[in-house]
Image (cartoon, rainbow, N blue to C red):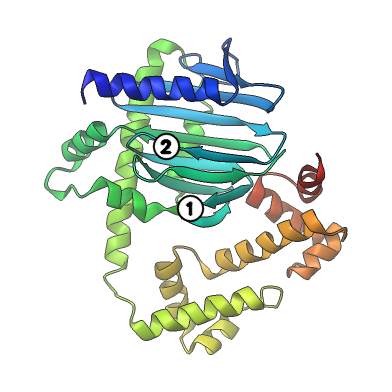
């Protein structure tokens, strides 16, 4: 990568911070001392954005802030591939439309379509991510994997969004909690950046081998029908046995095919549908939390509250308050 391209990427983020209401502030104990900490303007929200860059290679970003009003994000991100752990967020990506979820690993490809999203007010954005420059991930993957190297964009796109990537969850959590000094930080982050690339690539190989058992068109049609059934009957007792009968598949085949097709388990899919509906009920009705839990399929309010907190990053009553505060 040329020096001009490096400088452009570096200036982009510094300019973006300033134009978005963030100002550079002194280092804080909560974040590694080797990077730069930006504070969000109190007129817009509260919290911090921490940023570390290895020029021309990668940058590491920690989001830890919230907006006081629903905020539309529309930005053209430089060419890159990124991997991010979301511990708390509420909102929607708008192009294409889908919910933003917490408790997931999410990949992104920058430099093509603008990133367009709506971030809901008062719910913290807590995330940790690594963003790679093109020359770096190309060169590093070729060095690490030689003849088995494949298209890195395809490898990152295969992740998309998943709650089933524990190795990456731990790696990004370790980065979030790193407190080493500036001298050791470069080695630490370089090692983690390379390890994350390796994890992405190995997962892509695993997914490809899993998909060699190609789903038939009949299987795909039946899985589409099952998803539609779940969307309409999410509050019912949707056992694997029942869904297997509806889908005309054995339970083992259903579990395997569903995971290949939707990149999540049947239970994860049901849980996400239920909790998405719970968000709407909390925001737009006055139903007690216990009644909402039952309305979306959970008999125990405490269990529902724990699942909801993992799904959004906040407890149900906190979510209701944040959705209604002006």
Residue assigned mark 1: 95
How far, Cα to Cα, is label 2 from label 1? 13 Å
Q: Quadrant of residue 268?
A: bottom right
Q: Is residue 254 above or below residue 66?
A: below
Q: Is residue 259 above or below residue 180?
A: below
Quarter of the N terminus within the rendering: top left
Q: Which residue corresponds to the image point at 34% horizontal and 77% vertical from the top-left?
A: 215
Q: Is residue 324 above or below residue 173?
A: below
Sequence order check, earlier mark of 2 and 1: 2
Q: Is residue 256 left or right of residue 312?
A: left
- Residue 53 location, x and y as percent? 39, 21
- Residue 92 location, x and y as percent? 58, 51
Q: Secondary structure beneath disc 1? A: loop
Q: Is residue 300 left or right of residue 35?
A: right
Q: Is residue 262 left or right of residue 205?
A: right
Residue assigned mark 2: 76
Q: Which residue corresponds to the image point at 46% horizontal and 21% vertical from the top-left?
A: 15
The residue nearer to you, when weighing 129 against 6, is 6
């Amino acid at each position: 990568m040329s020096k001009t391209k490096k400088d452009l990427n570096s200036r982009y983020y510094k300019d973006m911070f300033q134009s978005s209401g963030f100002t550079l502030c002194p280092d804080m104990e909560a974040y590694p001392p080797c990077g730069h900490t930006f504070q969000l303007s109190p007129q817009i929200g509260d919290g911090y954005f921490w940023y570390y860059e290895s020029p021309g290679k990668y940058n590491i970003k920690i989001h830890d802030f919230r907006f006081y009003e629903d905020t539309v994000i529309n930005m053209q991100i430089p060419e890159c591939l990124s991997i991010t752990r979301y511990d708390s967020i509420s909102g929607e990506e708008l192009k294409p439309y889908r919910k933003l979820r917490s408790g997931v690993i999410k990949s992104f490809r920058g430099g093509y379509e603008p990133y367009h999203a709506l971030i809901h007010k008062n719910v913290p954005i807590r995330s940790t991510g690594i963003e790679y420059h093109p020359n770096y991930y190309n060169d590093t993957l070729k060095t690490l994997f030689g003849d088995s190297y494949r298209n890195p964009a395809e490898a990152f796109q295969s992740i998309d969004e998943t709650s089933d990537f524990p190795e990456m969850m731990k790696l990004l959590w370790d980065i979030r909690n790193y407190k080493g000094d500036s001298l050791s930080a470069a080695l630490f982050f370089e090692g983690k950046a390379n390890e994350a690339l390796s994890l992405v690539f190995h997962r892509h190989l695993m997914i490809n081998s899993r998909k060699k058992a190609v789903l038939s068109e009949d299987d795909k049609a039946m899985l589409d029908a099952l998803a539609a059934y779940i969307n309409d009957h999410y509050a019912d007792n949707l056992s694997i046995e029942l869904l297997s009968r509806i889908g005309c598949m054995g339970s083992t085949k259903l579990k395997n095919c569903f995971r290949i097709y939707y990149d999540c388990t049947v239970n994860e899919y049901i849980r996400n549908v239920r909790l998405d509906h719970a968000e709407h009920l909390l925001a737009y009705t006055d139903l007690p939390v216990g009644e909402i839990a039952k309305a979306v399929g959970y008999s125990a309010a405490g269990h529902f509250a724990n699942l909801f907190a993992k799904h959004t990053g906040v407890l149900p009553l906190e979510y209701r308050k944040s959705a209604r505060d002006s």
